[in-house]
Image (cartoon, grey):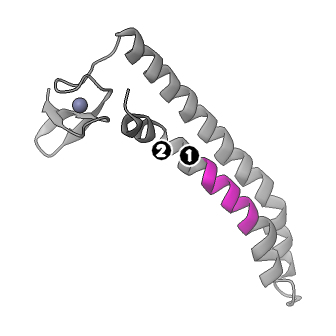
Amino acid sequence: MSNRMLFRLFDFPILLLVLAIVGLHFLGDLVPNWFSGSAVLEGLANGSRAAAPWVASALMLASFFFFTVNCHRLWRWNQGNSDCCFVCGGIVDHKHGRYGPYKHCLACGKNQKN
Ligand SMILES: [Zn+2]
């Protein structure tokens, strides 16, 4: 099991988690501070402050969902119940490209036509 494959498998949940943390800071602290001086934009600042925990919660929930799905993929691959790469035996993604469906290996990066 290569580190590259694990990183590629879990890069999207990690990205969503980082976006949740950055979004919480951005919507909860930065935007209200920018708009705090203006009386006209005070409502926007309050709305941003109120929306920040909801947006961060939704992103964390999505991150947890994709983390669980990818853990299931990793478990199925470990048990030998899923497709694997013809070169290295790593986990493959099923994609649709210009020349039709193909498999993309998450470990070595090779493509295989279905
Ligand atoms: Zn491979």
Q: How crowded is mark 1: few (under 14 residues within 10 Å), some or many (20 or more)?
A: some
Q: How crowded is mark 2: few (under 14 residues within 10 Å), some or many (20 or more)?
A: some
Residue under pointer 2: 11
Residue 29 position (above or below residue 60): below
Query: Where ligand 1 lies, by image quadrant?
Result: top left
Residue 72 position (above or below residue 100): above
Residue under pointer 1: 14
Q: Does the closest atom of ligand 1 sit within 8 Å of the Cβ of label 1?
A: no
What is the secondary structure assignment of the residue under circle 1? helix
Residue 109 position (above or below residue 75): below
Callout 1 amino acid: Ile
- Quadrant of the frame with the N terminus: top left
* The residue stretch that appears in magenta: 17-26
Predominant secondary structure, magenta span: helix
What is the secondary structure assignment of the residue under circle 2? helix
Q: Are marks 1 and 2 in contact (CB under 8 Å)?
A: yes
Q: Residue furthest front?
A: 2
